[in-house]
Amino acid sequence: MAQFPGNEFQFKAKELLERGYRLQQDGRIPEAISLYRHSIEIHPTPEAHTYLGWAYSTDGDYERAVAECKRAVALDPDFGSPYNDIGAYLTRMGNFPEAEEWFIRALKARRYESRHFAHLNLGRVYQRQGKWFEAITEYRSALECNPNYKPAEQARLMLQAMMN
């Protein structure tokens, strides 16, 4: 078997990850899962574990999804997406207190470009817990991160209407 430099493995793993992502976008989940797993075998990355978790969640397998995201966190504790995803899966499982902790961790992550997702999700958890003022604050924070994020604006408006 030919020996490849490390970056050759990284390139192949990234290529498989991207192909898996496209397949998942097309609804071809089993094929995407296969490519994500192969990518991880070649060169494990937090992104690949996070996407694999996302694929599992598509089929409602939230426990496996959480496990994959925890593997992503172990590889890169600064990567925010798996924290948010864990919180989202726990929310779907009805575990709001633990979900809240994961969303807060996502917001503290240094490498996280989509903070508006975590703010919205944390706001939804607060709203379900009856912490309406905290929820409004999170919805506003989501809009500060991304002023055009319609789900946060809609959630804020609906909650404010309920409070009046």
Image (cartoon, helix red, strand yellow):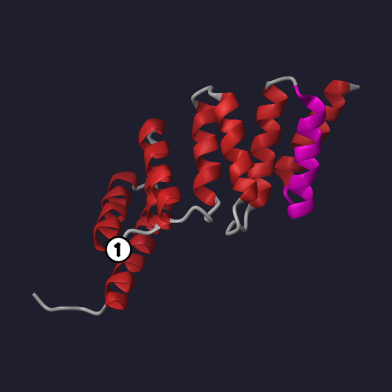
Crowd tier of the residue under label 1, counting other residues whose Cα lies within 10 Å: few below 14, some 14–19, many 20 or above: some
Q: Is residue 116 left or right of residue 6?
A: right
* Residue 143 covered by magenta stretch: yes
Q: Position of residue 20 (x, y in %)?
A: 35, 56
- The C terminus appears in which quarter of the rendering? top right
| Res 147 seen here | no
Magenta stretch: helix, strand or loop mostly: helix
Closest to the observer, 131 or 33: 131
The three-letter code of the residue at mark 1 reads His
**Residue under the image location 41 percent in, 50 percent down:** 74
Q: Position of residue 47 (x, y in %)?
A: 43, 56
In this figure, which residue is indicated by the disc labeled 1? 43
Closest to the observer, 143 or 20: 143
Say which element carries label 1: loop
* Residue 98 covered by magenta stretch: no
**Residue under the image location 31 percent in, 48 percent down:** 33
Q: Quadrant of residue 40?
A: bottom left
Q: Position of residue 107 (x, y in %)?
A: 64, 47
**Residue under the image location 82 percent in, 29 percent down:** 133
Q: Is residue 118 left or right of residue 19?
A: right
Q: Position of residue 4 (x, y in %)?
A: 21, 78
**Residue under the image location 30 percent in, 63 percent down:** 43
Q: Over which residues does the magenta segment extend?
A: 131-149
Q: Is residue 53 left or right of residue 140?
A: left
| Res 93 seen here | yes
